[in-house]
Image (cartoon, rainbow, N blue to C red):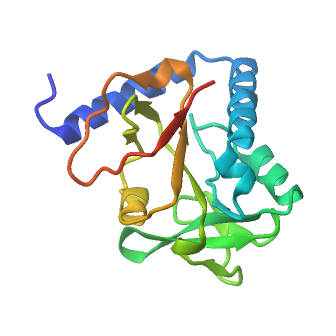
Amino acid sequence: MPSTIAEEKAELRAWIQVESAFRSPAARRVSDAALHARFLALPQVRLARTLLLFWGVGTEPDTLPLIDELLAQGKRVALPRCLPHRGMEARLIRGREGLVPGVFRIPEPGEDCPVAARDEIDVILVPNLCCDREGYRLGHGGGYYDRYLAGYRGFTVAFCPRFLLLDRVPRDERDVPVRLVLTD
């Protein structure tokens, strides 16, 4: 039995990898489409001018169709750019052009993309591996988003397929919950 929060999180990450491996690509596409539709229907999203999204990797939902849709609607869309010392900033994109492989080989905005100040971002879609009913999430373990969200006053939301919505996610004092967890 895990004895520390870090061990509990590592064990949960391993479980998610195993459980997610059994999902078919078709089931993932249906789940992603439902999450996208629910996100786009949120009043906070409809009213938002600037949104920070993420580029989904691994077991995370595919966010590329959502990014394309929001740009087509004329929204200002930002993606994260990793900085030294596990820092993060939001940079505005116009499309897929201008994206470069980041620290983890995840596409991120290049240095020529303008920085979006945190206080001008209306909605942040926060990545996760799973969430709990209180809005806490398990990420990949770098703490980038928890540091970025500290003090953020806008609207935060996370996507979570139903089978990954847990009663409680291991957490510590550095973890920042999202305001809304959307399920498929």
Where is residue 129 drawn, in percent x and y? 47, 36
- Residue in view at x 68 percent, y 40 percent: 39
- Name the quadrant of the N terminus: top left
Query: Could you tell whether 106 is left or right of 45 in the image?
Result: left
- Residue in view at x 42 percent, y 61 percent: 149
Q: Is residue 142 above or below residue 66?
A: below
Q: Is residue 104 above or below residue 11?
A: below
Q: Is residue 84 above or below residue 80?
A: below
Q: Quadrant of residue 28?
A: top right
Query: Could you tell whether 118 is left or right of 34 in the image?
Result: left
Nearer-the-camera pick, 69 or 143: 69
Where is residue 97 drawn, in percent x and y? 82, 68
Nearer-the-camera pick, 41 or 14: 41
Query: Looking at the image, which residue sits at the far right?
Result: 72
Where is residue 102 drawn, in percent x and y? 58, 66
Nearer-the-camera pick, 168 or 23: 168
- Name the quadrant of the C terminus: top right
- Residue in view at x 69 percent, y 69 percent: 100
Query: Could you tell whether 4 is left or right of 176 in the image?
Result: left
Picture mark count: 0
- Residue in view at x 64 percent, y 52 percent: 55
Q: Quadrant of residue 61?
A: top right
Query: Looking at the image, which residue sits at the far left?
Result: 3
Query: Could you tell whether 73 is left or right of 121 in the image?
Result: right
